Amino acid sequence: MTDSAHAPLQAGRPWPLGADCGAAGVNFAVWAPDATAVELCLFDATGTTEKARLRLPACTDGVWHGLLPGMRLEAGASLVYGLRAHGPWAPRQGHRFNPAKLLLDPWAREVVGRYGRQGPGPADDPRLAAELARHQGSSPDAPDWPDPHDNAATALKARLSIPTSPRPRPPRPHVAADLTVLYEAHVRGLTMAHPDIPADLRGSYAALAHPAMLAHYRALGITTLALLPIHFRADEAALQRRGLANHWGYSPIAWLAPEPRYGSGRPGTTPEGELIEAIDQLHAAGLEVILDVVFNHSAELDHTGPTLSLRGLANARAYRLGPDGVYLDWTGCGNALNLGEPRIVELVLGALRHWATHYRVDGFRFDLATTLARNRHGEFDPGAPFLAALQADPQLSRLKWIAEPWDLGPGGYRLGSFPAGWLEWNDQYRDTLRRWWLLGHGDRGGFAHRFAASSGQFHHDGRGPLASVNFICAHDGFTLRDLVSHDHRHNAANGEHNRDGHPHNASWNCGVEGDTADPVVLALRHRLQRALLATLLLSQGTPMLLAGDEIGHSQRGNNNAYCQDNATTRLAWAGADTALLACAARLLALRRRHPALRQAHWLQGPTDDAAPTVRWLEPDGRPLAADAWQADRGALAIWLQAAPATPADDSAPVLLLVNRDPAPCRFTPPAGAWRLAFDSDQPDGLPGDGDAFDCPGRTLRVLVGAPAPGAVS
């Protein structure tokens, strides 16, 4: 690196935003339209010593910019920097400029440092309190005035590095939509307790593609890892004071940078390099990677939160503000990013492109996506700026997009409202299926509607059934095992007096709260887990399995383990329920083989115009009639058939026998030869002896018929 830190800055150019190294030097461009000046602060490689402070000499259309001439970075070298913004301190007008606070470039691709706790220590460590206070924009003694204490020594800083020479990388798997099976997992929790992974790799990016994990993914039959957030985060001060951290990662502050805590720390490795290598290995194994991304809020929280980046650069425009500069908390996290502002849309798109091109991920799940789909007036709009820009982007439009279709703002619940091309988490599927199997609530019409991919929400504007992401459990809530073991949440370890987490879970403890040795209770719990898994993995739509549910992982009743980076969230591989794993694998093999179970078009009953793809039947074989849909009965048969899409597909019809009632039920099948292929009455789903049509209570069975005449099977 040629050191020209004390050379005067030239005007440079206002694009691209962030730091960009070229032949003439390093160009810096910072969006701060209401600032009166922006300073570039250069640091040593550790980020602890400030070497120079230089004012950006030009401002074009609200972008401050300058060129550091003669600064050349060779491969492997880096430059560490931060920003200071001058301007009015006028919170009621939305302005919170404070040049005493060093700010992180929102376009940083690598971050130096950590907000708050710098090392081990007790929760009540006075050093922690002092460190957190340094990053407050306003004075704790006079909230209407800026805090004068400089935070540069420990503030987050950006590191600009030159990547090594590119190398060939394996192609993306491009898993077909109908074959996609999502597997929601946390990088650390997935592998931290895996006995077959070396200790120095556990919980790291590298462990995601360890041979032991690749073998598990293949044996289970999932196609797509859906990883919880891995962008750089800043743990909330309240959690740090309790000795906790935002384990899930929903506290972002640098959207283009990977979280370094998931690097293994082995000599010669970096978090960035390990993540790239892991994604390449997963792609080579035919597996996709989707990232959960959080663009609805930032870790700066509300007015009591720290000033780390956007708040000190463009608070009045970057965040949704109400009268008197109050943050509109549409996310439950203190603030809401303003996706009605073009520069914030640009930041989000830039971050997505970086993950898609540099790391080569295959898609994104957007947390609280309604916030991203609000227009400049704050209203949900299917044609909102971000949605339109994403759809038109030549790189991003090819990837998979999944919306969490709600937020806490006005009109925030938008299930089924996103445009064609989007998939959406379907919480109504979750709630209906839980009540059906665990509480005995709901009629057959409601069950069928969710099983058939919720056409009432998704059958419009050319959208198909695969738009519904079906799930029973997700990171947010009970695990599958806990769902049948607890009537109540047990979240005391979170330090919020058991008030956090949803109190209504449609769960059932089967008669005993928590762990038990009662064989009758345990047998019932296992039976219900298998029935729930079978329904999930055989429903129309796109299934999502929570990692660990296939091996019986428990969080001991904690349904909001967002701050538990410990045994609570680390999958207990050593005690895995191997029968349940075999059951899940058997179900996914059935889904993969039979296109009737994963149809890309809406199910069609008998008509004069086309052959049916579904028949809804009473246990005695008669078609379900109008009034019978609402009858207080939990037994029905579902006949499905679809044309094969590939030579590997089986064109045979599939018959599901569903009996949620406690009592056994005798079914009369449609005419033809039927073979029992799955039985949730058995620990591993492998059919046993006995009459396939005498269905025990709380059971789902799958039978396969003879292929259509002339079809290949």
Image (cartoon, helix red, strand yellow):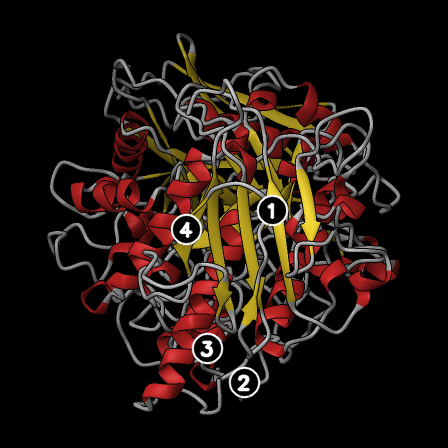
Mark 3 element type: loop
Disc 4 to disc 1, how far (Cα)?
14 Å
Above or below: residue 271 compared with residue 578: above
Residue 59 in the image: x percent, y percent? 68, 24
Residues under labels 2 and 4: Cα distance? 34 Å
- Name the residue beneath numbered marker 3: 558
Q: Report the number of numbered marks.
A: 4
How far separated are the C-alphas under marks 1 and 2? Answer: 39 Å
Residue 285 image-quadrant placement = top left
Q: The C terminus is located in which quarter?
A: top left
Q: Secondary structure at mark 4?
A: strand
- For disc 3, the neighbor class at 10 Å (few under 14, some 14 to 19, many from 20) is many
Q: Nearer the viewer, mark 2 or mark 4?
A: 4
| Residue 456 image offset from top left, x and y in percent | 80, 47
Which residue is denoted by mark 1 in the rendering? 670
Amino acid found under the numbered disc labelled 3: Asn
Disc on the earlier residue, 1 or 2 = 2
Q: Which badge, 1 or 3, comes first in the chain's sequence?
A: 3
Amino acid under disc 1: Pro
Packing grade of label 2 (10 A; few <14, some 14-19, many >=20) is many
Q: Which residue is mark 2?
A: 487
Q: Which residue is mark 4?
A: 676
In the image, 292 versus 438, the foreground residue is: 438
- Helix, strand or loop under label 2: loop
In this orientation, which residue lies closer to the viewer: 620 or 563? Answer: 620
Q: Is residue 295 above or below residue 90?
A: above
Mark nearest the camera among 1 and 2 is 1
Q: Residue sitting at 53 percent across and 32 percent down?
A: 178
